[in-house]
Image (spheres, rainbow, N blue to C red):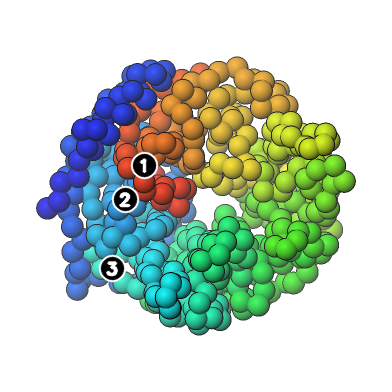
Amino acid sequence: MKIHRIGIAALILLFGLLTAACGTFQVDVESSSGAAVQSEDTEPPTQQPLADEVQLTATQAGTTVVFTKDGDILVWDDDTGVSRVIFDSGDVIRVELSNDGRLVAFLRRSIVQTGDPDWREQSALWVVDLSGENPRELVSADMLRDLLGAFERESSNIPEMTWIPGTHRLLYNGWTYLVMAEGETHAIPSGLYSVDADEGTQQVFVKTESTLRFVVSPDGRQVALLSPTALAFIDADGNNLRPDVLTYAQVGVPGPLIPVGVWTEDSQDFVMTESLEEDPAAGIDFVITRVPADSSAPDQLASVSRSHPGSVTFSPDGRFVAYIQYTDEVPPDIAGWFITPLGEGAGPLAIPRKLELGYPSLHWSPDGRAFTGALAELCPGATLDSEICNSPVSSLGGTTAIQWLDPTHLLLLTRDPSVLFLVTLDPSGRMDATSEPIEIWPLEEFVGSQSFAAVEAGNG
């Protein structure tokens, strides 16, 4: 059995962070870990959709967190407060937990020398039981490269993958890029593919010639397909494609901009940015539109100027949208992140619980409180990110990513150093004494939002 410990030097560094923060922490120094064991006895394939989600708080249910470190997969359990290694290949770059918390999907990256000094990266999609048993490859590196039509010198990866709610099926897209040039910063996602983690069956929903991103509906029955020029819907089994439900002009040179959007909680409408247009002063102008999934007429809710669609976040009640805005000066500067009403409202929205900070910053907790990316809470009725009423955790340093678990519990990933915290907020937004660090990474290891995932027990 492996023993997973937070190093002494890391603890000293962490202590400096914690003493500067509000509240107190209890740090569990030692944690045990068990190496992954491959078993021939596996659970039978899931034949029926899994049970609907049970609404429990993180404290009531217990939180399971998976993360990568040194290319291995570790599981941290809220009930025990310890981590254990379940897969120790040394090449894992991303993890995603199924909604029921039983399976961990992950990407393994390998390096192929194509010449001197040329080389490429390539990824393969795997899955393993949360216990560490039954690791298996779902999409090999060669299979992904074939799907994407990658050339010999091109690298290949999966930028987006998600579990279809209530199932053990994964949806993913892909992209190719030259690692010796600009890398993945200018790569363009394309295609849509499905794989069943229990049965291993594969489907091609949309071929790689189509540039798109996708968003699965909360009920797991349909998928929104966002391309640079049109919105389409398709059923989650790959049937009933409804192309060009909403069309718009392409913006972006050389790489096209792709709109962003979210589903309503009832899976009846999709709320998105569209009608993108370059602003004469700075940034992009666009509108926020509600598009019914039954192909009835769309409804424009708000317009935004001098912004970027990638910065957009929505309030869970569907009444507000937040976005970055630039000044009209030359050269332009960031004026701040603003909040504006969505007209009559879009209805309750299935907003993403995880946020990777960059363009997006201002966002909402599941119960509708507005926060900055540094987790400073905005005043009621605020319209700008500077209208702060409480700053409970901003002294922890720079924030890389946030994942809300419920209105009072969230995962917080800091940078320099990268530390993953489980944070508990009281009703006023302050950290209480049960908040604790889950993991600390060395400064040289890249850590981002794809490096961790979490679910609450009872979601399956």
Instruction: Determine the residue positioned at 83% across, 62% down.
Output: 249
Comparing 81 with 228, the one in front is 228
Looking at the image, is 183 positioned above or below residue 410?
below
Q: Is residue 273 left or right of residue 403?
A: right
Q: Which residue is mark 1?
A: 443
Q: Viewer-nearest of labels 2 and 3?
A: 2
Q: Amino acid at mark 3?
A: Pro
Q: CA distance from mark 1 to mark 3?
A: 29 Å
Q: Which mark is residue 25?
A: none
Number of numbered discs: 3
Q: CA distance from mark 1 to mark 2?
A: 12 Å
Q: Is residue 263 left or right of residue 12?
A: right
Q: Where does residue 436 sit, x and y in percent of width and height?
A: 32, 30
Q: Where does residue 366 sit, x and y in percent of width and height?
A: 55, 36
Task: Name which quarter of the figure residue 12 lies in.
Answer: top left
Sequence-first tag of 1 and 2: 2
The residue at the far left in this view is: 1
Q: Viewer-nearest of labels 1 and 2?
A: 1
Q: Where does residue 447 sit, x and y in percent of width and height?
A: 41, 47
Q: Residues within 10 Å of mark 1 (few under 14, many from 20)?
A: few
Instruction: Determine the residue positioned at 62% across, 20% down.
Output: 388
Q: Amino acid at mark 2?
A: Lys
Q: Which residue is mark 3?
A: 135
Q: Is residue 237 visible?
A: no
Looking at the image, is 240 positioned above or below residue 372?
below
Task: Name which quarter of the figure residue 116 lies in.
Answer: bottom left
Instruction: Determine the residue positioned at 62% across, 65% down.
Output: 188
Q: CA distance from mark 2 to mark 3?
A: 18 Å
Looking at the image, is 456 positioned above or below residue 382?
below
Sequence-first tag of 1 and 3: 3
